[in-house]
Image (cartoon, grey):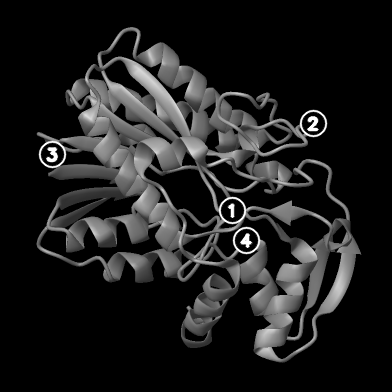
Amino acid sequence: MKVLVTGSSGFIGFHLIKKLLNSGHEVVGIDDHNDYYNPDLKLKRLALLESKNFSFHLLDINNMSINDKNFDLAINLAAQAGVRVTKEKEYLYESSNVTGFKSFCNFCRKKNINKILYASSSSVYSETNKEKFSEDATMLEPKSIYGKSKLSNEIYATEFIKSYEASMIGLRFFSVYGPFGRPDMAYYSFAKGIKERRIISLNNEGNMYRDMTFIDDIVEGILGAIDYVFNLENDSRNEVFNLGNDAPIKTSYLLHKIEDIIGIKALIHHSKTENEHQITHADITKAKNLLGYQPKVSFEDGIERFLDWHRHYENI
């Protein structure tokens, strides 16, 4: 199988491509290596993907000018990630996530790719929900610009397949973490801040909960979605799935767990944020039933595995 992956040097893209290559597939990667976080980490990931079955293009998603063809599948993971960016960079949500996704879809049309997966987010859900986030029952009302950009992708995908016969799967990721993860994520910044004896900003007294999902489980979920999209009986449909862990972790517990493992107490500054959910909790019933999705890595095991990696690679 020949697969196109955008955001190939990103956290999820890197781990997914490693798995695809190990399974004997051919992969073409696209990434712009922007400086949202240290590009050295992206270059390190890219170097570890070296293979005769992997080719890479340094391109912006809005300029996917490549000659490769005969793709069996396209996966869009490229995006401006995170709910917190500086005011000066908020435009990237529009250019990378909204306009960029449209560019990706048009590329698929041009290359006649009709099996498509794309990254969405738990941030599309409403804050008012008090139960698990369900694909079919929970109101969609994002609080953040990031969440709104991801919801726009889902809406656009539904419109896109009205004029182009394709099967599209949107994957709502829940707080993905693990080795080679994003340094802007809380678990990563907590670990680095504690080791460097820096003051850590703890939002909302640490009383938020996140459905933290280990990267290996996310990759297995994506592979399940790939199998699913190839077994659909008809094209022209857009489905979404939650990929989470169904076990929210309190932010203060996350911090204390990292403190315990490292053996150093954190220096904490309390702050407030208003554009994030108080809790995210994935209902993964649909993914279990249709994708064979079953998270296997507990938070305790996953954070140990991340910190073991971090001890060796923290200076990337």
Label disc, if present, on residue 277 of the rendered structure: none
Query: Which residue corresponds to the image point at 38% horizontal and 31% vertical from the top-left?
Result: 169
Query: Residues under labels 2 and 3: Cα distance?
Result: 45 Å
Q: Which residue is mark 1?
A: 175
Name the front one of labels 2 and 3.
2
Where is 65 relative to 161, above or below?
A: below
Label disc, if present, on residue 185 of the rendered structure: 4
Q: Are marks 3 and 1 in contact (CB under 8 Å)?
A: no
Query: Residues under labels 2 and 1: Cα distance?
Result: 19 Å
Estimate the x, y position of residue 223 in percent, counting from the top left. Answer: 30, 48
Label disc, if present, on residue 128 of the rendered structure: 2
Q: Amino acid at mark 3?
A: Asp
Q: Are marks 2 and 3 in contact (CB under 8 Å)?
A: no
Estimate the x, y position of residue 125 in percent, counting from the top left. Answer: 66, 32
Q: Are marks 4 and 3 in contact (CB under 8 Å)?
A: no
- 10 Å crowding of disc 1: few (<14), some (14-19), many (20+): many
Name the front one of labels 4 and 2.
2
Callout 2 secondary element: loop
Q: Which residue is mark 3?
A: 68
Query: Residues under labels 4 and 2: Cα distance?
Result: 24 Å
Where is 57 relative to 171, above or below?
A: below
Asked whether the viewer can see residue 32, the reply is no
Q: Amino acid at mark 4?
A: Met
